[in-house]
Amino acid sequence: MKRLGSLLGLIALLLVSSLQAAHAAAEKNVLVFGGAGNLGSDIVKELVRSGAKLTVFVKPSTDRKRLAGLPVTYVEGDARSDSDVKRAFAMAKFDVAINALARRNGETNFWDRTQMSITAAAKETRVGEVVFLSSVGAGDSAAAYSPQAYEKARISLIERSKAEDDLRASGLRYVIVRTGAVLGITTPATGKARLTEDTTVLGPVTRPDLAKLVVDCVTDSRCANKTYHATDDTLKIPVERLN
């Protein structure tokens, strides 16, 4: 009976914690950049389930079918335009801004330019927190890649490093989540993904699991001002990311 009482007490504690997290998320007004993309749409769906109020920044030409039927507000613009980014932040008083943008192939000066613009506008409008989806290999995690693999992504990783450094220096509360390999949409969630501050970790993660990790950090103050690597120990990283 004593053991049963302890178990019931633990279940009750977990339930209270879950309800508190859901309540915290429901109070958030969130601006998501790249929210109509593969990863971004999973983040938006997870935020909608949490009860958060959502505004999604998209290009006028962006296909919004992944968000069809969801209760979101759209703001149109180009993330490479400082004025468009500022206009998006001026629409409301946002608690959180999330950068889940995807770069088009061959585009340079993208990660630093867009994130630094987001950071500046967030600081100007006193946004509570900025979440940046970065990449393993940026900053102090360069050694996680082999020299050959790093060289293939060097320009992109330098851009992300600049963006990370600028966000850390901004004085804003931030969360940086670095990814190694985000697996395709056909790979189902495992529920086993985790965040680690170990900068040597290079692992795979599914999109829905990554979205869950990001949204969990939006509601967890313990994530504040930390840089994480997302990984799932139950999955194997594609060999092309290692060579």
Image (cartoon, rainbow, N blue to C red):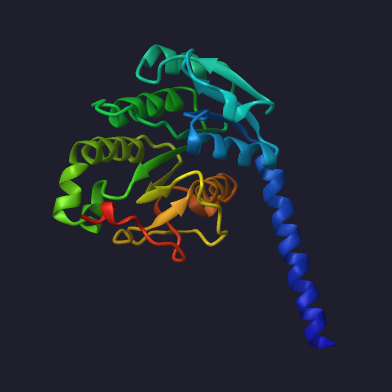
On screen, residue 122 above or below 236: above
On screen, residue 148 above or below 233: above
Query: Is any part of residue 39 visible from this angle?
Result: yes
Q: Position of residue 104 (x, y in %)?
A: 33, 27
Which quadrant of the structure image shows residue 197?
bottom left
Q: Position of residue 136 (x, y in %)?
A: 31, 50
Q: Position of residue 131 (x, y in %)?
A: 46, 39
- Judged from this view, the residue extending furthest toward the front is 186
Q: Locate residue 124 relative to residue 44 in the image: left or right.
A: left
Q: Locate residue 222 relative to residue 29 in the image: left or right.
A: left
At x 24% / y 27%, what residue is drawn?
106
What is the quadrant of the C terminus in the image? bottom left
- Give the total number of marks visible in the rendering: 0
What is the quadrant of the N terminus in the image? bottom right
At x 22% / y 52%, what residue is drawn?
142
As rendered, which of 133 and 185 lies closer to the eye?
185
Which quadrant of the structure image shows residue 201?
bottom left
Query: Is any part of residue 129 visible from this angle?
Result: no
Q: Locate residue 106 relative to residue 18 in the image: left or right.
A: left
At x 45% / y 60%, what residue is drawn?
232
At x 76% / y 77%, what residue is drawn?
7
As rendered, which of 121 and 57 lies closer to the eye?
57
As rendered, which of 136 and 221 lies closer to the eye?
136
Q: Position of residue 209 (x, y in %)?
A: 53, 51
- Judged from this view, the residue extending furthest toward the right is 1
